[in-house]
Image (tube, coloured by chain):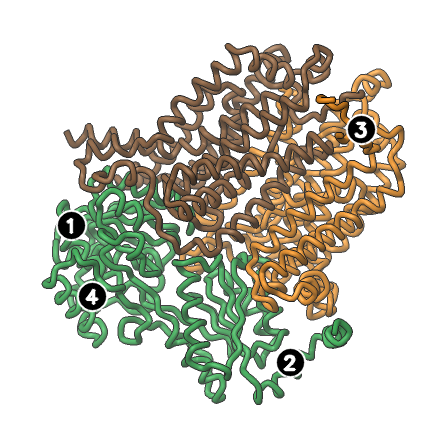
């Protein structure tokens, strides 16, 4: 016998809710087995992974801080994917946003007034947009596929940042270490809860959820995106421009990624360093899919992903388990989630195979 | 005499630096030709590297290590194929997940093997290597996997353009619906192409852990999977150009070092952007008119196939 | 069982601080933060050896924990803070990039003591420490020049920060002290850890005639290339003899154990104070790994004499006269560079082929 997939006429709503839970349950089971194999008490280890990061105000604040860039990048990516515009270079736009916004902070130094922070945020958004605009231009003008262009531009951005902090923007007082001077206090995002690190960036990230939903669900642009994504022919017939959608989606997601970038350097980091992102832009693609390309789902997915990062540190401290364990569990969870999605769109049927030897 | 040895050394260093890129890139090229975009190269290479190393240490035989690495890479690709081709999960997301898993998994299983010194491929085959003269030494360093990186592109080229199976594979990558209508097993062909890609990535990883730098350390692939991915696009999905791209990339790195050691100043960061920027330029050149793009890029790349549709 | 654990964890974050007084009776908690996976050799591995030395020396009086592979940047601050709020009373942050995060956390936890490796910013509860790696480099350079036939040596280095520049300069000066014509070629990999790139760099250096290769990177690749090609190497961070049994001459290693044990004891006794420690051969913080059988006795004795001179202060590696690459005098004869000048070093001495 073999399995056969039959597409459902409409997605199975119950499964939409159940699939992530099923995946988390399977991944938890897998993680527990892994812990037991490594000679740890599975319950204690699972506790350290999933619960202990949340046991304090500071822990929750850290969770919000870690989820912020994932959320901002993922919302933009998801809106693009809905319109069949694939921005997988949020990492690069994040970095260029951080460079542009950070450049403003460094340029004005202590001379900045109240306007400095807004200007930095704008520069960050503009930087992210500009980097994404390269891909939009090459796609609409030369038909170059944005998956590949945005990916290549990500690696380029990493090198540009490296060049700046090793060269022209290096802190002259910094003993030749690759870093810029620290930003002035006026160039740092205000902290929301005293004693923690969660800052204004989290508010932007939260706001992006309802705004993204609105955009996708109600506004005309949202409608347009859906039509273009599902059937390019129909969209052209209805008078929607494919080029316009490409530009809109890439600028939107680039701007959000740029915002995430400047929020990271004007928030917890406070200066430019050779590495400012542990791969948020790429992790955000996974977050977007885990969240089913829907802003509310993405919010939960971003929190879950952030929790796994934090829990990995908890596992090291309380269970002396290497960080690699977290990567394996992350990978398992992602596989299960991606795999479980099949039940939403398809009916799985067992087809008895006609016996070859009677 | 000395100059000849130096020139040969630079060429051999370039060939060796390019070998993992050629091997992994060829595998991905075949997969992409069949319409499958697997971004998990880095993860598959790491798992190949660690599996090959462990198998070589356990059996004391490098050949078993290479075989195990190919199987491990193929196993990773099988997981990818199961999710994307079987359960129709998104290819981009699954490929990225494959890399995250591969980085963690390889580090976990390889943890206790980090302290193991091992004799590399070149010194195992040519024990006289370390005492040979400079010219002979360079020749001996061209080990079988480097030869393979020269021969395999020819074989893949012949397969893609001169064999019936290659024709079918390309047809599947062009339009799965048409290929399906002709009665070809789209999914089966794509699974096989993906498995081949995984095996080649595994082999490329094992080249690193058993030949180029005979050791296992976490994350030792250090981004070569992503470069191989870029090279596939740079090559416009043609094996010959893939090799040229890999050599160019290897040569730029080596030439950069060469210039530095002679006391010249180069910005290593700006040098490192070259492969990516040139890939974008090539992409623009081949994409700007649709006819040319059709001749070059697999049209169904990354698109899911739904036989009932 | 789960219930009790949960009640424990629901306690407010201040519980960690409050526990400190109670902890005086129990073992003292000490935390370590590493920048890379511990692995089997390299920078973080040496710090891990230091942590194990603390465990071995103080036994049940301490409880040490570590977190490996912590990215320098936003993640570091969270990890350091987590260690602080978990009740660790002394925290070692072992990478330069942890400087600002450590200071930020230290401000919030004034009663907890922090130690930051290789940094230059201190506070009442933040001490800094590092080792004079260049002292080891000087002697290693001397040994390398004695073993070299071509007089050309190679150095595969990551980034031109002062610590690396000091090492390259000291190696060159040491080499030139026994062979005034010695040359050291420098190649930058722009990465602390990329075995493949290090190997390619070594291939190029060997092709250009270098017959002793050293490195300031984190992997064991250089020792292995040397063994494969029959070229001598001088390893860095850790003893890598097993990767180059025939060719790895020695290694400039860092030994943190004594320092860590001393600081933990001071913290226990209440005598810990902030400050800067920059130890060398004299303090046992820098050592040369056991020499390869290929190193002749005469060279061993010469090296031992130099080490003794450096330890008692009669030989300073950065003693004038020193010229820069263009042959211009930088340090006058009879003068020696001050610690501050050494710490800020941004130029190469005569005999180095390469650019910063």
Residues tagged by mark 4 and mark 3 found on one chain of the structure: no
Q: How many marks?
A: 4
Whole-percent x, y for residue C310 in the image: 21, 71
Quadrant where the image shows the N terminus of chain C: bottom right
Give residue C129's quadrant in the image. bottom left
For residue B52, side relative to residue A209 (left or right): left
Secondary element under disc 3, as helix, strand or loop, is: strand
- The chain carrying label 2 is C
Q: Which mark is residue C148?
A: 1
Whole-percent x, y for residue B72 in the image: 53, 39
Of residues C237 and C294, which is closer to you in this image?
C294
- The chain carrying label 3 is A
Question: Which residue carries the number 2 mark?
Answer: C17
Question: Which residue carries the number 4 mark?
Answer: C319
Quick check: marks 2 and 1 in contact, CB under 8 Å? no
- The chain carrying label 4 is C
Question: Which residue carries the number 3 mark?
Answer: A351
Which chain comes out green in the rendered image?
A: C
Q: Badge 4 local density, few (<14 within 10 Å), some, or many (20+)?
A: some
Secondary element under disc 1, as helix, strand or loop, is: loop
Residues tagged by mark 1 and mark 4 found on one chain of the structure: yes
Quick check: marks 3 and 1 in contact, CB under 8 Å? no
Quick check: marks 1 and 4 in contact, CB under 8 Å? no
Front position among marks 2 and 4: 2
Q: CA distance from mark 3 to mark 1?
A: 73 Å
In the image, residue A257 above or below residue B146? below
Which chain comes out orange in the rendered image?
A: A
């Amino acid at each position: 016998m073999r399995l056969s997939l039959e597409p459902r006429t409409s997605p199975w709503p119950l499964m939409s809710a159940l699939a992530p839970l099923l995946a988390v349950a399977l991944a938890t089971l897998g993680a527990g087995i892994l812990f037991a194999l490594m000679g740890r008490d599975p319950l204690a280890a699972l506790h350290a992974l999933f619960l202990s990061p949340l046991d304090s105000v500071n822990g929750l604040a850290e969770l919000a801080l870690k989820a912020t860039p994932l959320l901002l990048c993922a919302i933009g990516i998801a809106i693009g994917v809905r319109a069949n515009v694939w921005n997988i270079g949020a990492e690069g736009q994040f970095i260029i946003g951080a460079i542009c916004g950070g450049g403003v902070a460094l340029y004005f130094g202590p001379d900045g007034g109240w306007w400095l922070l807004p200007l930095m945020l704008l520069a960050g958004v503009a930087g992210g947009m500009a980097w994404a605009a390269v891909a939009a231009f090459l796609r609409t003008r030369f038909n170059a596929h944005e998956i590949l262009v945005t990916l290549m531009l990500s690696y380029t951005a990493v090198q540009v940042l490296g060049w700046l902090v090793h060269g022209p923007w290096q802190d002259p007082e910094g003993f030749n270490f690759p870093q810029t001077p620290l930003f002035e206090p006026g160039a740092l995002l205000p902290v929301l809860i005293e004693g923690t690190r969660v800052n204004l960036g989290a508010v932007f990230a939260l706001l992006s959820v309802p705004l993204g939903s609105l955009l996708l669900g109600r506004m005309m642009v949202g409608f347009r995106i859906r039509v273009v994504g599902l059937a390019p022919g129909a969209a052209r017939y209805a008078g929607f421009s494919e080029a316009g959608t490409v530009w809109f989606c890439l600028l939107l997601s680039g701007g959000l990624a740029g915002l995430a970038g400047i929020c990271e350097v004007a928030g917890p980091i406070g200066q430019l360093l050779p590495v400012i992102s542990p791969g948020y832009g790429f992790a955000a693609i996974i977050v977007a899919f885990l969240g089913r390309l829907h802003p509310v789902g993405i919010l939960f997915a971003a929190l879950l992903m952030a929790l796994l990062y934090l829990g990995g540190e908890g596992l090291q401290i309380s269970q002396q388990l290497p960080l690699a364990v977290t990567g394996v569990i992350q990978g398992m969870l992602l596989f299960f989630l991606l795999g479980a999605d099949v039940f939403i769109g398809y009916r799985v049927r067992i087809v008895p195979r006609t016996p070859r030897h009677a | 005499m000395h100059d000849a040895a130096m020139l040969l050394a630079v060429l051999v260093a370039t060939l060796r630096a390019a070998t993992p890129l050629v091997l992994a890139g060829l595998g991905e090229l075949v997969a992409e030709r069949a319409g499958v975009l697997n971004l998990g190269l880095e993860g598959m290479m790491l798992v190949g590297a660690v599996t090959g190393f462990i198998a070589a240490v356990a059996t004391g035989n490098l050949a078993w290590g290479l075989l195990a690495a190919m199987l491990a890479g193929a196993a990773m690709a099988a997981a990818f194929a199961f999710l994307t081709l079987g359960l129709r999960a998104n290819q981009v997301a699954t490929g990225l997940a494959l890399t995250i898993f591969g980085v963690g998994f390889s580090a976990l299983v390889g943890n206790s093997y980090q302290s193991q010194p091992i004799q590399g491929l070149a010194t195992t085959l040519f024990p006289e290597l370390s005492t040979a003269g400079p010219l002979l030494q360079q020749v001996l360093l061209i080990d079988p996997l480097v030869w393979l990186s020269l021969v395999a592109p020819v074989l893949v080229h012949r397969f893609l353009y001169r064999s019936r199976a290659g024709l079918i594979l390309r047809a599947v990558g062009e339009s799965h619906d048409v290929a399906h209508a002709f009665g070809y097993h789209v999914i089966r062909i794509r699974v096989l192409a993906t498995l081949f890609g995984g095996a080649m990535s595994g082999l490329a990883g094992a080249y690193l852990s058993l030949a180029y730098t005979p050791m296992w350390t976490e994350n030792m692939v250090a981004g070569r999977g992503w470069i191989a991915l870029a090279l596939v696009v740079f090559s416009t999905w043609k094996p010959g150009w893939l090799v040229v791209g890999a050599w160019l990339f290897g040569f730029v790195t080596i030439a950069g070092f060469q210039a530095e050691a002679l006391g010249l100043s180069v910005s290593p960061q700006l040098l490192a952007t070259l492969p990516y920027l040139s890939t974008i330029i090539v992409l623009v050149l081949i994409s700007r008119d649709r006819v040319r793009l059709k001749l070059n890029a697999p049209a169904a790349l990354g698109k899911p196939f739904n036989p009932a549709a | 069982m789960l219930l009790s654990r949960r009640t424990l964890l629901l306690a407010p974050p201040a519980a960690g601080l409050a526990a400190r007084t109670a902890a005086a009776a129990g073992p003292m908690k000490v935390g370590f933060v590493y920048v890379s996976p511990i692995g089997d050799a390299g920078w973080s591995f040496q710090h891990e050896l230091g942590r194990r030395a603390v465990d071995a020396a103080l036994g049940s009086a301490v409880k040490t924990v570590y977190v490996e592979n912590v990215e320098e940047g936003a993640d570091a601050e969270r990890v350091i803070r987590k260690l602080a709020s978990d009740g660790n009373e002394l925290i070692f942050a072992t990478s330069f990039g942890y400087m600002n995060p450590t200071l930020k956390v230290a401000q919030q936890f004034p009663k907890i003591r922090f130690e930051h490796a290789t940094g230059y910013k201190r506070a009442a509860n933040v001490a800094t420490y590092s080792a004079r790696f260049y002292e080891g480099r000087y002697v290693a350079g001397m040994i390398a020049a004695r073993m070299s036939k071509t007089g050309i040596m190679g150095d595969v280095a990551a980034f031109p920060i002062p610590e690396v520049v000091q090492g390259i300069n000291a190696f060159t000066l040491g080499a030139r002290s026994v062979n005034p014509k010695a040359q050291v070629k420098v190649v930058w990999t722009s990465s602390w850890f990329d075995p493949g790139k290090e190997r390619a760099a070594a291939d190029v250096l060997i092709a250009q005639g270098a017959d002793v290769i050293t490195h300031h990177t984190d992997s064991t690749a250089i020792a292995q290339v040397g063994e494969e090609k029959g070229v001598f190497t001088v390893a860095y961070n850790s003893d890598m003899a097993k990767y180059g049994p025939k060719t790895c001459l020695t290694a400039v290693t860092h030994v943190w154990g004594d320092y860590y044990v001393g600081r933990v004891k001071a913290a226990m006794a209440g005598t810990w104070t902030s400050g800067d420690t920059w130890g060398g051969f004299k303090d046992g913080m820098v050592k040369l790994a056991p020499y390869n059988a290929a190193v002749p006795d005469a060279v061993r004795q010469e090296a031992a004499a130099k080490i003794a001179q450096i330890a008692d202060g009669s030989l300073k590696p950065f003693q004038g006269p020193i010229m820069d690459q263009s042959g211009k005098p930088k340090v006058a004869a009879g003068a020696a560079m001050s610690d501050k000048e050494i710490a800020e070093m941004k130029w190469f001495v005569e005999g180095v082929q390469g650019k910063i």
